[in-house]
Amino acid sequence: MGKYTKNKKMIITAILCVLVVLIVILAVIFFRQPKQKLVTAGQNVIITVTASSVSDMYGYQFRINFDPDEFEYAGGLHSKIQDIETIFANDFSGYKLVGATMLGDSAGFTGTDVIVCEMSFIALKDGDLSEMSLSMSNVGVVKSDLEYITDVPDWSMNATVAP
């Protein structure tokens, strides 16, 4: 009888170990799944543009690309960099050309983890923001000596549904 009890304990211990491993694997899979950013038609979507670092930036421009069947520009464009307040957004088919500049003779802005600007769009249909057509491209920066740099890396945009 002692032999069977010992085998039962070993089997139960082995089963418990397998269950713990399975739970850990499932937890890792669950928490690594990207979270959906669901949006409903009519909701406001805030676009925040960031740069990991900028040096001597006197101005900038970039495209916000969007599907006009999915989004409509709602305005609210404003610079988050105090020294670069003159900002605009021009309409083109399928994108907004956003640009901003300093005025006068001054040194360019330098910083890290910079929130560059924000703007708003209205969702025209329900969906997952990560699967909808909304992106940024063609980032260019003007230095204070008026040198223009194209295809600037390390800029990104984040789309969030407004509360």
Image (cartoon, helix red, strand yellow):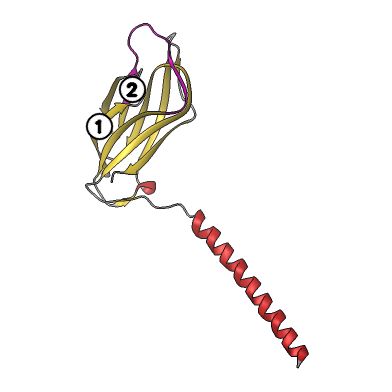
Q: Is residue 50 left or right of residue 11?
A: left
Residue 143 place in picture, x, y as percent: 44, 14
The correct choice, above or below, for 28 with respect to 23 in the image is above
Residue 32 included in the magenta stretch of the image:
no
Residue 95 place in picture, x, y as percent: 31, 32
Secondary structure at badge 2 equals: strand
The correct choice, above or below, for 39 with respect to 156 in the image is below
Residue tagged 1: 76
User: Which badge, 2 or 1, comes first in the chain's sequence?
Assistant: 1
Disc 2 crowd rating (10 Å Cα; few below 14, some 14-19, many 20+) is many
Q: Quadrant of the N terminus?
A: bottom right
Secondary structure at badge 1 equals: strand
Q: Label 1 is placed on what type of residue? A: Gly
Count of numbered labels shown in the rendering: 2
Q: Is residue 2 left or right of residue 117?
A: right
Q: Label 2 is placed on what type of residue? A: Gly
User: Foreground: 124 or 156?
Assistant: 156
Residue at (34% x, 33% y) in the render? 64
**Hey, which residue is sitting farthest bottom in the picture?**
1
User: Foreground: 13 or 79?
Assistant: 13
Residue 63 - label: none
Residue 149 place in picture, x, y as percent: 46, 18
Residue tagged 2: 99
The correct choice, above or below, for 155 with respect to 9 in the image is above
Q: Which residues are magenta?
A: 98-114
**Hey, which residue is sitting farthest top in the picture?**
105
Residue at (33% x, 36% y) in the render? 47
